[in-house]
Image (cartoon, rainbow, N blue to C red):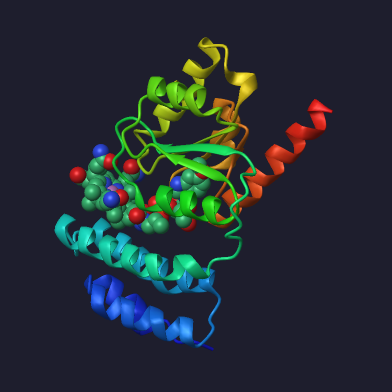
Amino acid sequence: MFDFTKLSNAVIEGDNEQVQVYVKEAIDAKVDPLTIINEGLIGGMNVVGQRFKVNDMFVPEVLMSARSMNAGIELVKPFLAGGEMSNKGTVIIGTVKGDLHDIGKSLVGMMLECSGFKVIDLGVDISPEEFMAAIKENDGKILALSALLTTTMLSMKSTIDVCVEQGMRDKVKVIIGGAPISQEFSDQIGADGYAGDAAAAVELVTKLLKDNEMVAR
Ligand code: B1M
């Protein structure tokens, strides 16, 4: 059983070098790559979140932790399953208007890519119109929206509303996720599904595309 305490602590301290040392140790010990991400890297980031909430950590420190987490993820990336270059479908992903959080969204995008989907990552603070343009330009089959703030959850609804207004709602499946999001909220705003983490997002996208093929037949 690998002890993730040192790795999580290195993320909390925002120490890139130590994060990389412990991630390499875990890789050498043949720990499952997803477990390294979930227990070691995200585990540390969760503590950062709790400390940020009670003003025990501040924005610059949070950003350093986020950077360390990403440095670790970069090392794990080549070991994630999949990797086949086939395109199972194009996913347009982004963080909705008004929201600048990108760590979870990028993780979801990376996992989808590693599972064989083509991922167009638009970044953060993306307006409904920008999402629509990207779907049209890239023949997107899945629109994946991330939000971390209770205030920007509403931008998810606006994005779906614009999708309907532009007559594109039946051309694309919409999935949503992020810390404040739930299945109930997904049902309320008429999304096609909610995923709680990156692995669940891969399962959901796979299922939605499969269901869609069956309908088309
Ligand atoms: Co912000 N922030 N933040 N923040 N921040 C939260 C979200 C908060 C909960 C902190 C807190 O108070 N406890 C709080 C929101 C409160 C609320 O709305 N209820 C908050 C706040 C208030 C703010 C500011 C308003 C602070 C301020 O300025 N006063 C401000 C807003 C800026 C803006 O967006 N307009 C702000 C700013 C920032 C930083 C810039 C400092 C930084 C972001 C850096 C970056 O992303 N590049 C930051 C961070 C890092 C956090 C916390 C600490 C960590 C978020 C994170 O990256 N987690 C966060 C506290 C927390 O969540 N515990 C917090 C790790 C990441 C892997 O998890 O993003 O949840 P997560 O993604 C998960 C799942 O949610 C899911 O899969 C991922 C992997 O498991 N998922 C999806 C995510 N997207 C998905 C999409 C899917 C499916 C699954 O399908 C499409």
For the residue pair 27 and 163, the one nearer the viewer reads as 27
Residue at image location 53% in from the left, 81% down from the top: 31
Instruction: From the viewer's perspective, tell me whether residue 40 is left or right of residue 63.
Output: right
Does residue 142 appear to the left or right of 157 in the view shown? right
Is any part of residue 177 visible from this angle?
no
Residue in the picture at 69% in, 38% down: 209
Compared across the picture, whether 128 is left or right of 118 comes to left
Q: Nearer the viewer, residue 70 or 14?
A: 70
Residue 179 point in image, percent of width and height: 43, 49
Above/below status of 110 relative to 141: below
Q: Residue furthest front?
A: 85
In the image, residue 82 above or below residue 19: above
Q: Is residue 96 visible?
A: yes
Examine the rendered structure and indicate whether residue 129 appears above or below residue 10: above
Q: Is residue 5 or residue 90 the one in the foreground?
A: 90
The image shows residue 21 at horizontal and vertical percentages of 32, 83
Residue nearer the viewer, 141 or 57: 141
Quadrant of the drawing holding the N terminus = bottom right
Q: Residue 215 appears at what percent x and percent y?
A: 80, 28
Q: Residue furthest right?
A: 217
Residue 10 lies in what quarter of the image?
bottom left
**Location of the C terminus (image quadrant):** top right
Q: Quadrant of residue 11?
A: bottom left
Tally the numbered discs.
0
**Residue 143 image point, x, y percent:** 53, 33
- Locate residue 66: give its quadrant: bottom left
Residue occupying the point 23% across, 60% down: 62
Q: Which residue appears at 31% of the width and 33% of the height?
A: 125
